[in-house]
């Protein structure tokens, strides 16, 4: 079962960002599937690392776009990005410690909520950067 289904309502209108957002959701859903199926280490750890690296690369790109355009909400947006990277690292460590059930619940409570809130609020403002 997918944690998040892509929706056109998430679209920023900036095609390459939207493409990466869709891909991030796919990787998050794959991770969630593994955790829910009680996937074993190190597979789940690898999934967490893949998500973390992909998210970090995406944030670098998005933050550069905001800096290049002198985007007003830059600092707050960047702080939200850093919060997600911290969450991914924390959940991965928790999973490695064997706290599988908590991680399953927290994926929905924290990561899903983060993505949906971020798309609806911070990303909605990126439409001012459309080419
Ligand atoms: Fe983004
Ligand atoms: Fe963002």
Image (cartoon, helix red, strand yellow):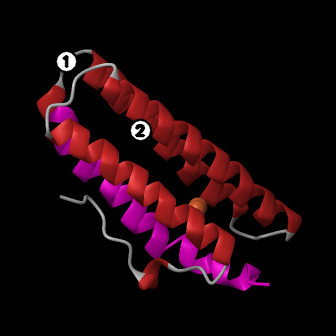
Residue closer to the observer: 81 or 58: 58
Q: Residue at x 16, y 43 (%)?
A: 105
Q: Which residues are magenta?
A: 102-131
Residue under pointer 2 = 87
Location of residue 26 by image quarter: bottom left
Q: Local crowd at mark 1 within 10 Å, few (<14), some, or many (≥20)?
A: few
Q: Earlier in the sequence, mark 1 or mark 2?
A: 2
Residue 83 at x, y percent in the picture: 50, 44
* Figure quadrant of the C terminus: bottom right
Residue 85 at x, y percent in the picture: 51, 40
Q: Which mark, by number, is residue 98? A: 1
Q: Nearer the viewer, mark 1 or mark 2?
A: 1
Q: Residue at x 48, y 55 (%)?
A: 24
Q: Is residue 103 a member of the stretch shown in magenta?
A: yes
With respect to residue 51, does 45 lie above or below? Answer: above
Measured in 3D between alpha carbons, the distance from the residue under mark 1 to the one under mark 2, in whole angstroms, is 17 Å
């Amino acid at each position: 079962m997918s944690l998040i289904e892509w929706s056109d309502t998430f679209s920023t209108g900036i095609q390459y960002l939207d493409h990466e957002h869709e891909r991030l959701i796919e990787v998050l859903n794959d991770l969630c599937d593994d955790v829910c199926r009680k996937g074993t280490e190190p597979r789940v750890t690898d999934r967490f690392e893949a998500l973390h690296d992909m998210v970090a690369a995406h944030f670098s790109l998005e933050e550069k776009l905001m800096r290049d355009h002198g985007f007003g909400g830059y600092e707050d947006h960047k702080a939200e990005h850093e919060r997600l990277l911290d969450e991914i690292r924390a959940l991965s460590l928790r999973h490695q410690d064997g706290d599988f059930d908590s991680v399953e619940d927290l994926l929905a409570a924290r990561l899903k909520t983060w993505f949906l809130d971020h798309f609806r609020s911070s990303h909605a403002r990126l439409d001012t950067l459309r080419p």
